[in-house]
Image: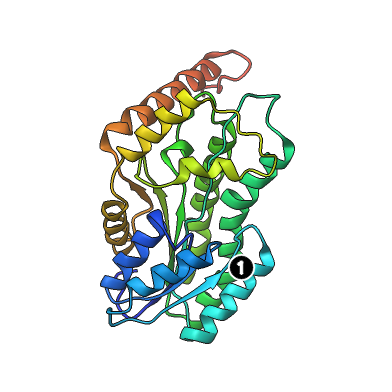
Amino acid sequence: MTEIAGKTAFITGGASGIGFAIANALAKRGANIMLADINQAALETAKAHFADMNVGVDTILCDVAKPEDMQRAAQATLDRFGKVHLVVNNAGVGLGGEPGKIKMQDWRWIVDINLMGVVHGVEFFVPHIQSHGEGGHIVNVASMAGHGALAGMAPYHATKFAVVGYSEALKLELMPHKIGVSILCPGWVKTAIHESASRRPSGNVDMDAAENLIMKQVIESGLPPERVAEWTADCVEADRTYIFTHPEMRIGIDMRYALLKEDYSATAAHPDFAVAQDG
């Protein structure tokens, strides 16, 4: 998508954090905005922020984990703006824990939001983008946690790796329809995601006070969402696939792919798998 002005964007988790910042960046570039969130009060506050901008802005209460909510949100966007061009699947939560101690209901909770919420955004909005033939763009918010893993956050890594792989496939599938796909993979950003685990269905918050304080300090020292949002808008206009925010974190990707290549080489060198050479 080379031009954001005059387009309509639908953004989940749009009342705060990265979602709200992206909405603001897109609105400044002339896009109409539909904000979706599970917090009605936050939606009203967010909408008021755009009152002086010369763009159309509306809101809808929406739980991305519920397909019926996302289907309703898609129709509401069309009813309000006539078309939709840009979908930002941003809503997400964090969850960690030790293997064998994570409740199944909590696993379902994070998968339904972080992965299925993205799927719902794609499945219910892509047909509408295709219908007008003007092209469009999808931004799926993953994380650097979708490219490398740390101990203690397996559920979060599982969902973010899934979003990266799903989005890479979408990029290929939607290209013929003039629909671009970008994967936002931020490092530490100053948001409230570290507080989201307190809403897990089981109520089993097992992070101790010291660990929680460290996480809070790391998050609060992260990039301002506004910087991430402006870069995201730039990358959408440039049709960039991956949107990274922390150049210094490339070392993690380099280490991961060095391990992949090393173990692949071991397979290639094994007589049971080595490719026979002609002659």
The coloring applied to the image is: rainbow
Q: Which of the two residues, 272 or 19, is positioned nearer the viewer here?
A: 19
Residue shown at 33% from the left, 74% from the top: 50
Residue 190 found in image quarter: top left
Residue shown at 32% from the left, 27% from the top: 251
Residue 96 x/y as whole percent: 57, 32
How crowded pointer 1 is (Cα within 10 Å; few <14, some 14-19, many 20+) is rated as many
Q: Is residue 119 left or right of residue 83?
A: right
Q: Is residue 7 left or right of residue 155?
A: left
Residue shown at 32% from the left, 66% from the top: 24
Residue named by callout 1: 70
Residue 23 x/y as whole percent: 37, 66
Residue 226 x/y as whole percent: 28, 55
Residue 60, above or below 273: below
Residue shown at 29% from the left, 77% from the top: 30
- Residue 178: tell me if it is visible: no
